[in-house]
Amino acid sequence: MESGDRDGEGGAYGSLGKLNAYESIGDYRKAIEHHEKLLKIAMQSEIGDWGGEGVAYGRLGKAYQFLSDYRKAIEYHEKLLKIAKEISDREGEGVAYGGLCNAYKSMGDYRKAIEYHEKDLKIAIEIGDREGEGVAYGGLEIGHRGGEEVAYARLGIAYQFLGDYRKAIEYHEKLLKIAIEIGDRRGEGVAYRSFGNAYKSIGDYRKAIE
């Protein structure tokens, strides 16, 4: 970049480093490399690019999550959370809490995951984020954004892993209600599938079949 356009350079690295540009080939190491360049530029900005720094931390946390380096993912989600709180970015806080709960859930720490789910949910309700970015359901992987719908899905699954099926069903019902309200057919499917698993776990096979 001979022009010395650091902001433009940062934007370029941001575009190159987006995870969706590398997901198809699973090159998360390459994504991390570009995110780290974006972070360096944001931190060196004369005016202090807090937003760019927060975005970079969030992306790095997500990349390390995909690489199953959950300790590193937590480190970056916590840095994002700190910045989001400093600049009063409630949506950014929700993103950070969502990333933290995914990381702890992947490590099998469901109680810690629930703690962050509930914080994520509180923010989602506060800012009116009913849908978030939708529910990308695949085992324990339910997206990294906030949203009331997403938070209920996460909470239901976390309680299911803890063996608290009644509590899990309670959150599946909340998820189903919102999914129907906003016309999210995929979310409805997630809720029904989760209901089936929960009722099967408590031995109510007729309800599970329904």
Image (tube, rainbow, N blue to C red):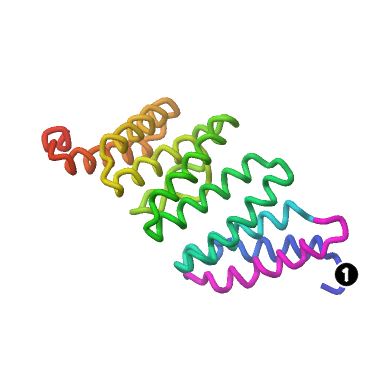
- Residue at screen point 19% across, 38% down: 199
Q: Residues within 10 Å of mark 1 (few under 14, many from 20)?
A: few
Instruction: State the extent of the magenta-drawn residues as a range.
Output: 26-48
Residue in front for this viewpoint, 92 or 165: 165
Residue type, label 1: Ser
| Image spot of residue 28 (x, y percent) | 53, 69
Q: Closest to the observer: 183 or 68?
A: 68
Quadrant occupied by the N terminus: bottom right
Residue 43 covered by magenta stretch: yes
Residue 88, x across and y down, in percent: 71, 41
Q: Is residue 3 magenta?
A: no
64 displayed left or right of 165: right
Res 75 quadrant in image: bottom right
Res 23 visible? no
Q: What is the magenta segment's predominant secondary structure?
A: helix
Q: Which residue is mark 1?
A: 3
